[in-house]
Image: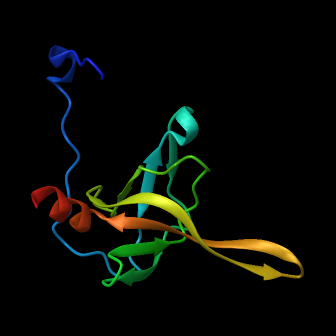
Amino acid sequence: MVRINAKALQNIEPLQISKKEPREHQRCNIIGHPKGTPKKVSLQKNIIVKVSKDTRTIRYTTDTKSGSSGSPVFDNDWQVIALHHASAESEKRDGKKIWLNNEGILIAAITDEIRK
């Protein structure tokens, strides 16, 4: 259990959830605290490469550190579109494993589950 001082939260605005579905080639950004470290902001090389309606996930080239699962994935209007949860694809090139993209669960999938 965690005890929260309500007064400390009075001036904190909640994150806004996007009403728009993300689309391929759209930019996305991630803010997180990988493994509890100080805040990291991923703003570069940040393109959505795949939107899967079947698995309700997106894949993006936004780079993250290990331990970033649970970080919000934002669109360029700083509205939440997904929650980061995994490194998704890699391939071997010249015997080396090359990272290709990460994956997030669409925020709409999460809010739909909460509403059930």
The quarter holding residue 76 reads bottom left
Name the side, left or right, on which 110 lies relative to 114. right
Q: Quadrant of the C terminus?
A: bottom left
Please state the horizontal and vertical placement of residue 25, each as a whole percent of the image.
42, 81
The quarter holding residue 17 reads bottom left
Q: As rendered, which of 116 and 106 lies closer to the eye?
A: 116
Please state the horizontal and vertical placement of residue 40, each as a whole percent of the image.
53, 43
Q: As rendered, which of 75 and 36 lies closer to the eye?
A: 36
Above or below, 8 against 52 in this view is above
Q: How is the image coloured?
A: rainbow
Q: Residue at x 25, y 61 (%)?
A: 110
Please state the horizontal and vertical placement of residue 94, each as a whole percent of the image.
89, 82
Name the side, left or right, on which 68 lies relative to 56. right
Name the side, left or right, on which 108 lies relative to 34. left
Name the side, left or right, on which 8 lies relative to 62. left
Above or below, 36 against 96 in this view is above
The quarter holding residue 113 reads bottom left
Q: Residue at x 56, y 46 (%)?
A: 67
Q: Residue at x 19, y 52 (%)?
A: 16
Most extreme residue toward the right, as rendered? 94
Q: Quadrant of the N terminus?
A: top left
Please state the horizontal and vertical placement of residue 19, each as a whole percent of the image.
15, 67
Q: As rendered, which of 5 and 74 lies closer to the eye?
A: 5
Q: Residue at x 19, y 23 (%)?
A: 9
